[in-house]
Image (cartoon, grey):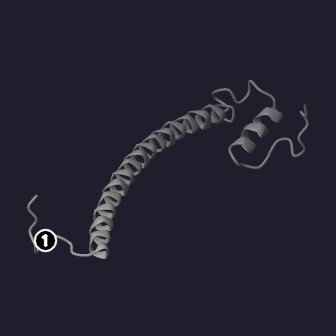
Amino acid sequence: MDFDATKTPRTHATWKKAYDAQELAKLMVELSVQLEVELNVATVNEAIAENKVHILEKRIQRLESFVNRFLDPEDLGYTINKCLRDDAREALGRSRVESPIKENKP
């Protein structure tokens, strides 16, 4: 076996340092791969969450539109009683108008 005298470590400490540097390099590669995988997972999770937010926003808009129909006298407004109209107002964050005290308690 032929060794290059300028590149061959002469002492145990030099061998250990070379071994530690190689192990450190391997560890850094493993950690960078792990971080890349975690970043990809986080990116996918963020996209899923944004999609869910979009779907929920559309659903809330449809529900608010439906509840607003109960307050429109030309639509469903006069087909339900005043307590239900006030419940619809409360669901939309407004105050009760027609029945100050909630009369239709379950």
Asked if 47 appears above or below 8 in the picture, the reply is above
Q: Amino acid at mark 1?
A: Lys
Front residue of 75 and 34 = 34
Picture residue at 8% right of the left edge, 61% below the top: 2
Residue at image x 53%, y 41%?
A: 57
Instruction: Tell which of 11 and 94 is nearer to you.
Output: 11
Residue 71 picture quarter: top right
- The secondary structure type at the circle numbered 1 is loop
Q: Residues within 10 Å of mark 1 (few under 14, many from 20)?
A: few
Q: Which residue is mark 1?
A: 7
Residue 90 on image: x %, y % = 75, 44
Q: Quadrant of the C terminus?
A: top right
Q: Residue at x 73, y 27 (%)?
A: 78
Q: Is residue 44 left or right of residue 82?
A: left
Camera-side residue of 29 and 100? 29
Image spot of residue 63 (x, y percent): 61, 34
- Between 39 and 70, the residue placed more toward the observer is 39
Q: How many circles with numbers are drawn on the protein?
A: 1
Which x, y percent locates residue 45? Answer: 45, 44
The residue depicted at 33 percent of the width and 56 percent of the height is 32
Q: Quadrant of residue 68?
A: top right
